[in-house]
Image (cartoon, grey):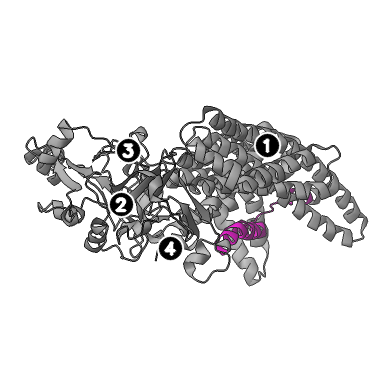
Amino acid sequence: MVLESLWTIKELFVYPNEYIYWSIQIVMYPFMTGLVAGAFVLSSLYHLFDIKPLKEIARFALVFSFALLMVAPLPLLLHLTHPERSLYVMLTPHFTSAIAAFGVVLFVYASVVASELWFLFRKHLVESSLTLKGKTHKSPAEKIKYWIYTILTLGAFDLSATSLKLDAKAIRILAGVGVPIACFLHGYAGFIFGSVKANALWMTPLMPVIFIMSAIVSGVALCLLTYIIIMEIKKHLASRKSSPTAVNSLNEMKGVEADTMRTTVKYLTFFMVFSISLELLDLVFRGYTAVKSWDILRSIIYGKDFINIFLLQYVVGNLVPFVLLLLPGMTVKRAVPSLLLVLFGVFMMRWNVVIGGQSFSLTFSGYMDYHLPVIPYSLDTFKEGLGGALFIAVLPFILLWIFNMILPVLESKERDGKT
Amino acid sequence: MNRRDFIILAIKGTAAVVLARGLDGIFRPADVQAWTLPRRFVFLVDTYKCIGCGFCVKACKLENEIPFEADVSRTWVERYVITGDGEVFADTPKEARYGFITGRIDQGRGRFKDIPREKIKKAFFVPKLCNQCAKPSCVQVCPVGATYQNADGVVLVDRKWCIGCGYCIMACPYGMRFFHPVLHVADKCTFCYHRINRDMQPACVQACPTGARQIGNIKDPRDPVGSVIRTQRVAVHKPEYGTEPKVYIIGLDEEVR
């Protein structure tokens, strides 16, 4: 039994070995790395260019980027038929392959983000460690926390003004270095597809650039969305307290949130313009040059995948949120659905590239339909099905929640207020 | 040991290592073999001779232990039926492992198409197998080097090293590769490497009743297959991909995909 036949239905003339080998997990892979890159670029906008309204969301975006980064290789791992051999990519990298450097790129990027995080939160780590150290009677949880904080300081307890200044400088440098690496990480995912000469839909030098632009769009959208949701929860919690300080902080929160939201949306729409233009350029160019493969591509783009591409991706995922985001007087109620649609649009773009690229045969005279396994009845149908995809999608939020227990991901204002 | 002795020893040791590495480079077994016996395996398919019996597919599956009922195969036979008004129908029902037992064209999704005999202007079979390209894109994209090309041109897969990413499957313009249904590693036609290395013929060549499939050594000036390729009009599949296929076809029609 061929595993891929579980979700591939062939039509007309298709080579016997052709199936949809790259399924939902390979849709998730560029989607997740895209979010990583986008979140990092968003955080760098503040750290590098000092765009003040993004201060609040910047540190959050960096932490989120790290959480997403830890999940990004998982779809690949779940997809490999021999995941136990995944380390071979590091042991015997075959550098003519676009995938070979994945481990190296990911590792370098992870180091940059981890270092930047460390510099960003060093003050907090040292302070927390010292506060807990001063406590005479520590509960077991506090003991664990103390050890975590102390280890994470890496022994650098110096909090003098010069030392903190150095931290800030390091953050700036790392943010600067990180942007090209983040773009590389994701442009590279685009290259993996764009360089497959056997695939008529994938092969275009525009692919890496398209991927980077849509990556930034999705990363910014997800960060802003999560930020708004967290702020709303916080506001809700604050409104239940009736003390005057609570009311003050509530109003302050509202102001900050609105400010951050407006600025972030501005950048989001800016990147959306680039992303959509590039995709349309690709489409127009293919239609205009109309090489041999265009007949089958046209039947996919304007026929079989019309709803996925034009309705779901371009209209629902791009046009509608674009208009909603551009309308004046942005409110949370409008921002949330718009951002969800933006994310959906980018996901559909990934889907249409990965699945769409495999929905026609190498014969150019046959088609393959993809049927996502929804109800898992074996490990494979879970891994390569809806369950596996949802697992990947939920994991970064769980990681973010864990990070939030250790690091003040969104509490800078409150902490500044107290001191 | 004084410093002088140590330095001399270090120089000698380095020289020995360099020499050994150099010799290793010259005398790798594969290179020695290529040097003593120049070989470049090529394949010749004569579409005029193919009768679509499917014995080649059957023999291949049995010889190479690809589960017989699994819908993947290292080789297959395609049928092309072209009508007077230029309509092209093609199929390869079950890779033709049972041959072409019906005149109806398999259109997938359980549908078959009857084409009235009087409408058919041209019909023929085309056996397909790995092209053992001179510039194989599958080898290029393997991230761990599990798939590689031998000095004699045959592209092989190391089943103990393949991680199963599927990139090579995506990269092959001919759709030759698949995941082995049992071993779950990339699999492909090897020209029956275990056989041709012992001067035997590939299973499909041996099973072919009409001689539509032949293997040869293009580097041997006396090789009959090589001389056909050199002296007659032959073509290769999809040369536009730049992979330089080494399966040559006699009677390749422009409608062949």
Magenta stretch in the rendered image: A387-415
- Residue contact between numbered discs 3 and 2, judged by CB atoms under 8 Å: no
Q: Residues within 10 Å of mark 3 (few under 14, many from 20)?
A: few
Q: Position of residue A114 (x, y in %)?
A: 55, 47
Q: Nearer the viewer, residue A376 or B206?
A: B206
Which amino acid type is shown beneath numbered disc 2? Val
Total marks shown come to 4
Front of the two marks 1 and 2: 2
Left or right side of B19 for B102: right
Looking at the picture, do discs 2 and 4 lie on one chain? no
Front of the two marks 3 and 2: 3
Q: Residue at x 61, y 67 (%)?
A: A143
Estimate the spatial distance between the alpha carbons at disc 1 and disc 2, rounded to whole Å.
48 Å
- Residue contact between numbered discs 4 and 3, judged by CB atoms under 8 Å: no
Which amino acid type is shown beneath numbered disc 3? Asp
Residue under numbered circle 2: B77
Front of the two marks 4 and 3: 3
Front of the two marks 4 and 1: 4
Front of the two marks 2 and 4: 2
Which amino acid type is shown beneath numbered disc 1? Met
Chain letter of the residue beneath label 2 in the structure image: B
Q: Is residue B115 magenta?
A: no
Q: Residue at x 62, y 63 (%)?
A: A145
Q: Residue at x 64, y 69 (%)?
A: A141
Mark linked to residue A272 = 1
- Residue contact between numbered discs 1 and 3, judged by CB atoms under 8 Å: no
